[in-house]
Image (spheres, rainbow, N blue to C red):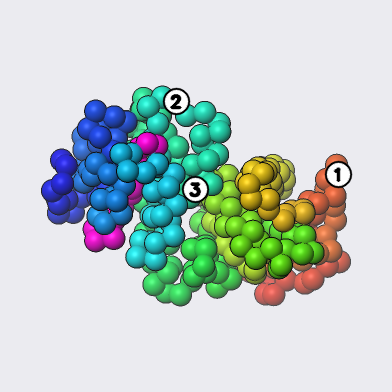
């Protein structure tokens, strides 16, 4: 399918690129797995189509006749007429290098894929991404998202914590919350756009470094939280380390220089929610308290865990 409309009831994928390129192979894989595919040859045409068709996912070649895929990705991500929760994928003719993946993530892509990506793996990943998009679109309609980043706000995070906690309670599973604070340089305000770019890059890093099952939110101007199901205390430390690495990598590019001085982390986790004497939403409170006055994890002064001597939880014990 090239420039025709989608079939009724099918998820719509907008693919930008040539039929004989990586876009063509993606089109074939998607069309044979139940997607309606709208392919456009140029980036500008893709922008127009994205604004009018509300696709479930947008796939673009790294090189297009009128612009680069990264330029198209940045344009789509900044366009207010296109949902910030729409998955954007960049494709390359060969297996992408680490540098290509990092540049794609910085441009706002959710993934950077090679031409030989397995079709079944691609479709399963896309369906998971689209479920996340539907959740985010519903949350936006209910006022649960931060307007500038597309992440959950405090109210949205509290609701998602309760939902994930209820599931973990039924399954006797583990649940963790990691809160991260970006410490900017003292003259960050004077740097203006660079400070804003630090936050945007960090948001994209959090999205890319987390799992699809993780929930990412914004608690303040430079403070973020990740709720991670099936994650015990040891897993929470590993998650924190991975998220911090991703943020630091995102700020490592020399142009422009980003005023990120340090990333601090607080966390709390329970191994079995079914036996935990706290409400799931209290994980947010405890992780935030740990960020400020928690106990440092051995070998890492910037990762701290909640202890009972900090801030008490906002609600009492009980079933989620």
The quarter of the image holding the C terminus is: bottom right
Nearer to me, 240 or 166: 240
Q: Which residue is mark 2?
A: 95
SS at badge 1: loop
- What is the number of the mark on residue 298? 1
Disc number placed over residue 317 in the picture, else none: none
Disc 1 from disc 2: Cα separation:
38 Å
Instruction: Work out whether mark 1 precedes mark 2 in sequence or the reverse, and give the earlier one.
Output: 2
Asked if the stretch drawn in magenta spans residue 51, the answer is yes
- Which residue is under mark 3? 107
Say whether residue 56 is magenta: yes
Disc 2 is placed on an element classified as loop
Left of 289 or right of it: where is 59? Answer: left
Q: In the image, is residue 40 above or below residue 289?
A: above
Q: Which region shows up in magenta?
A: 50-63
Distance between mark 1 and mark 3 Cα atoms: 35 Å
> Is residue 260 found left or right of 40 in the rendered image?
right
Residue in the image at 21% along x and 38% along y = 31
Name the residue at the front extreme: 66
Mark closest to the chain's N terminus, 3 or 2: 2
- Mark 3 packing: few (<14 Cα in 10 Å), some, or many (20+)? many
| Quadrant into which the N terminus falls | top left
Q: Nearer the viewer, residue 77 or 205?
A: 77
Of 162 and 93, the residue lying toward us: 93
Q: Secondary structure at mark 3?
A: loop
Position of 81 relative to 132 (above/below) = below
Q: CA distance from mark 3 to mark 2?
A: 19 Å
Residue 169 in sight in this render: no
Q: Is residue 53 visible?
A: yes
């Amino acid at each position: 399918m090239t420039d025709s409309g989608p079939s009724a009831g099918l998820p719509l994928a907008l693919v930008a690129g040539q039929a004989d390129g990586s876009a063509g192979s993606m089109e074939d894989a998607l069309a044979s797995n139940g997607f309606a595919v709208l392919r456009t040859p140029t980036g500008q045409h893709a922008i127009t189509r994205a604004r009018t068709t509300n696709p479930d996912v947008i796939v673009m070649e790294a090189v297009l006749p009128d612009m680069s895929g990264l330029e198209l990705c940045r344009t789509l991500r900044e366009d207010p007429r296109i949902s910030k929760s729409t998955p954007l994928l960049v494709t390359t003719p060969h297996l992408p290098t680490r540098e290509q993946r990092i540049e794609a993530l910085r441009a706002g892509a959710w993934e950077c894929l090679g031409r030989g990506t397995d079709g079944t793996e691609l479709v399963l990943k896309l369906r998971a991404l689209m479920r996340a998009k539907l959740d985010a679109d519903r949350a936006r309609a209910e006022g649960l998202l931060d307007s500038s980043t597309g992440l959950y706000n405090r109210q949205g995070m509290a609701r998602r914590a309760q939902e994930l906690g209820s599931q973990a309670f039924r399954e006797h599973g583990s649940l963790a919350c990691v809160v991260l604070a970006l410490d900017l340089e003292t003259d960050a305000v004077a740097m203006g756009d660079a400070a804003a770019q630090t936050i945007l890059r960090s948001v994209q890093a959090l999205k890319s470094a987390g799992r699809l099952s993780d929930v990412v939110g914004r608690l303040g101007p430079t403070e973020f939280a990740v709720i991670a199901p099936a994650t015990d205390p040891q897993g929470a430390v590993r998650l924190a380390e991975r998220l911090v690495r991703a943020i630091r990598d995102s700020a490592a590019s020399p142009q422009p220089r980003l005023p990120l001085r340090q990333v601090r982390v607080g966390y709390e986790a329970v191994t079995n929610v079914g036996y935990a004497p706290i409400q799931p939403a209290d994980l947010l409170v405890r992780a935030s308290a740990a960020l400020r006055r928690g106990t440092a994890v051995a070998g890492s002064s910037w990762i701290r865990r909640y202890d009972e001597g900090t801030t008490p939880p906002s609600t009492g014990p009980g079933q989620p």
